[in-house]
Amino acid sequence: MEEVIRSDGRYPPEAFAFLHDGLSHAVKDIHGQEGAPVEDAQRHVSGRQLCLALKDLAIERWGLLAKTVLGKWNIHASIDFGNMVYLLIENNFMRKTDDDSIEDFRDVFDFDEAFDVPVDFDLK
């Protein structure tokens, strides 16, 4: 897998590690306990669901720096998550259903709005 990622060159291996963590996060949120004994088809998440889980995970991990960290990995829009997923699908590291499309990842959320995390300073 690392050879495919490096050969493609758009996103670094660290971005794919984050994608993997986000997928686990999405599966857990949508289908319950992570690693539960269910069939792969029952653990499917949509492109939209994955993007939203990745957004939440980025904010949880990096807070105000989420957009900066993702940008350093060349991730500037939700379609970048789709590009990563479809690279893995095309190389048989992930699977998709007949209903899935890379377009499911397009414009899921606005990066500027999503990562403009308000800071609550209590100056009292």
Image (cartoon, rainbow, N blue to C red):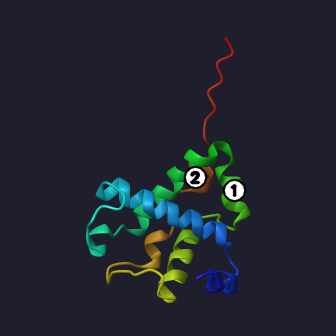
Residue 14 - label:
none
Disc 1 target residue: 69
Q: Amino acid at mark 1?
A: Val
Q: Is residue 68 left or right of residue 34?
A: right
Q: Residue at (50%, 88%) from the top-left corner?
A: 90
Task: Kindly state the secondary structure of the residue where label 2 is placed.
Answer: helix
Task: Kindly state the secondary structure of the residue where label 1 is placed.
Answer: helix
Quarter of the image with the N terminus is bottom right
Q: Position of residue 82 (x, y in %)?
A: 52, 73
Q: Residue at (69%, 16%) from the top-left corner?
A: 123
Q: Amino acid at mark 2?
A: Ala
Residue 58 - label:
2
Q: Position of residue 110 (x, y in %)?
A: 56, 56
Q: Are dots 2 and 1 in contact, CB under 8 Å?
A: yes
Q: Quadrant of residue 27?
A: bottom left
Q: Position of residue 34 (x, y in %)?
A: 36, 58
